[in-house]
Every structure is written in C-alpha cells, then in structure tokens.
Image: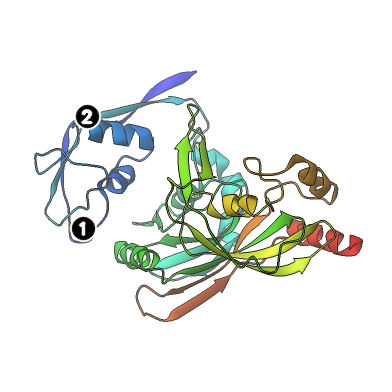
C-alpha cells in the first residue's frame, strides 16, 4: 500500500545565507526537501520549477549568499513503512561505532550492509539514522560516500564551514584514504599503480555499473600487499581519484576481483571464501588522513576490521 507524502505544500522562496553559500543547488535541495528522491530533485530543476534569482539553472550551480531560490510544491509517493523511530534498534549501534567526534565533525566506522543515505528503495541510511538519534543536532551532512556493502570510515560534518573545508581538501587531494580488500589469487608485486579510465552507466533498473573505457574519466589507485594466502591476497588500496566503484573495478581489471563482490566478482572464488566464513564484500575503509577543518591539525584515524573479517583472515592463514 502506498500513500502520498507532502514535502512542500506551496511555493517557497528561500534566501541563501552566508553559511549556506558555496554548496551545489542539488545538495541544498536534498537537505531542504528531506525524503525526496534525487531523481525528482533533478527533474524539477531540469523542468525549470526550481529557479534561482528568477532564472533557470542547473543542479550543479554553486549558490551565493543572498541568492533567492524558488522551491515548488513537492509530493512523493511512498510505501507505508514503520517510521525510523521503530527502526532505531537496527541503527542504534552506530553510536558505538563513532571513532572520533568534536564540535565540527564526527567519524564513524560504518557497518557493511547499511547505505550512507536513503534512496534506491531504502527508506533510511547512516545520515538519516544519525539525524534521528541526534534530533537536537542543527546540521549533519555527509562529507563523502562509501558503497552500501563497504564498511569503514565515513566522515560527517556538523557545521557548514567544516563541510566546505573537507570538500576543498577532497578536491585538492589533501585527504588520503586507505582500504583493505581481500582479492582472488596472488596479487603481483609489481602492480603498484593502476591508471584505468572508468565509465559509469546506469541500467533501466537504476543500478550503476562501471567499466574500464577510454571514454571514461581518469582514475588512479595505488596498491600494496599486506598478506598472502593460498588462493587469495589481502591488499591495501589507496585511491588517488574518487570514482564510483573505483577500487572494485580496478582490482577486477587487474585480474584479482574482490571477495563476494556481487557486481564485479568471481563466483568460484566467492564459494571458497564463503567456506572460510565470509558473508559480505571484503572491502573496508581502513584509514583516513586529513587536516582538521577548524584547527588545521593533521588527523589520522583508523577503523579496525570487525571480528568476522578477522576470523576469515585467521581461517585463510591456517590453511596457507
């Protein structure tokens, strides 16, 4: 059964403040029209229903202080589901997964299987859960994203100024990320850098697929070997660029797909890994290095592997 949910009942004219300046129009609308799918946001912008200073614009337009944004009435159809308050038992563990927090930001060790935000048929994600758990918080926004099935470090800004600073660091490649991945076979020692352009496409179902293509965007990942096993390798991957599914596609391109990758993996290898006790994608955002958005202090934060992943490695180690 579905119902119609009113997000915005009438036309609104919103004036952009200094703290809101610099962000993209689509991100601004997503924050203001909570619960509205991103596809609908793009549609109302494309049709000219959203206007900035009385003119049509694009979703990627960077807002300026004192811009006036026209927001049309918005209604969405939704399935009748329990409200997020009834789901808190599933996401309350996120509080215990916070690795670092201060007035500017928090860093969370995201579990595998939880999306970073609602959408694509999901009613909630990490950011919605955090907002529900901390209803008093005035501002909570994702700094970046990681795939639903990937675990590990996720940055969340608690101030607009922190979000701007961290976004700038991402653009300038100040932020350094390291992932741990379990891949098929013996990773070659000489394969230290993969530079393979990636092209993203979307199927009719909305599923995103990425492949190596000369028509794609420049992409680079650096690799090193952490440990070898009989039929697998634990590697460290450091993405220089931040393309969708970058590490997953680059490891596949190298002939070493990640264990239990339902898009780019190898079924025979996955069967062996399941026998070793693995039941999820073995890709974990292990470490991040950046400058604190307020103090400029160098921050290095690590997120340990969970007990189940450590158990899989111990099993593989015993069979080596």
Which residue is at the front of the view, 167 or 36?
Answer: 167
Residue at x 43%, y 26% (from the top left corner): 78
Residues at circles 1 and 2 in contact by the CB criterion of under 8 Å:
no
Dot 2 falls on a residue whose secondary structure is loop
Q: In this view, does 200 lie above or below 79?
A: below
Residue at mark 1: 21
Residue 308, image quadrant: bottom right
Which residue is at the front of the view, 6 or 122?
Answer: 122
Q: Where is residue 245 in the image (x, y as percent from the top left)?
A: 54, 49
Is any atom of residue 36 visible in this view? no
Quarter the C terminus occupies:
bottom right
Q: Position of residue 283 (x, y in %)?
A: 64, 55
Is any atom of residue 74 visible in this view? yes
Residue at x 37%, y 38% (from the top left corner): 38
Residue lying at the far right of the rendered structure: 319
Q: In this view, does 3 lie above or below 30?
A: above
Specify which label sits upstream in the sequence, 1 or 2.
1
Asked whether, in this view, residue 112 is left or right of residue 117, the answer is right
Residue at x 62%, y 40% (from the top left corner): 263
What mark, if any, has residue 101 been given in the picture?
none
Residue at mark 2: 47
């Amino acid at each position: 059964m579905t119902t119609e949910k009113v997000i915005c009942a009438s036309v609104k004219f919103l004036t952009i403040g200094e703290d809101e300046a610099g962000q993209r129009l689509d991100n601004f609308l997503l924050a203001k029209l909570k619960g509205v799918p991103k596809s609908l946001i793009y549609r109302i912008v494309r049709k000219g229903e959203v206007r900035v200073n009385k003119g049509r614009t694009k979703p990627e337009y960077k807002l300026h202080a004192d811009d006036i944004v026209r927001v049309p009435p918005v209604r969405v159809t939704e399935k009748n589901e329990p409200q997020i308050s009834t789901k808190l038992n599933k996401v309350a563990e996120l509080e215990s997964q916070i690795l670092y927090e201060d007035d500017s930001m928090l860093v969370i060790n995201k579990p595998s299987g939880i999306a970073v935000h609602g959408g694509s048929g999901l009613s909630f994600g990490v950011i919605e859960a955090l907002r529900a758990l901390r209803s008093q918080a005035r501002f909570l926004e994702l700094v970046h994203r990681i795939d639903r099935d990937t675990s590990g470090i996720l940055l969340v800004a608690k101030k607009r100024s922190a979000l701007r600073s961290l976004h700038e660091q991402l653009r300038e490649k100040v932020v350094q990320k390291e992932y741990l991945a379990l891949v098929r076979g013996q990773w070659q020692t000489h394969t230290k850098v993969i530079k393979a352009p990636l092209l993203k496409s979307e199927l009719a179902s909305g599923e995103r697929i990425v492949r190596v293509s000369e028509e794609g965007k420049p992409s680079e990942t650096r690799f090193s070997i952490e440990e070898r096993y009989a039929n697998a390798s634990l590697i460290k991957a450091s993405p220089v660029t931040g393309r969708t599914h970058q590490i997953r596609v680059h490891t596949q391109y190298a002939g070493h797909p990640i264990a239990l990758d339902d898009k780019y993996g190898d079924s025979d290898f996955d069967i062996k890994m399941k026998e070793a006790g693995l039941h999820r994608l073995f890709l974990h955002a292990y470490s991040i290095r950046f400058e604190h958005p307020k103090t400029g202090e160098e921050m290095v934060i690590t997120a340990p592997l969970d007990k189940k992943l450590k158990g899989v490695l111990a099993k593989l180690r015993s069979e080596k």
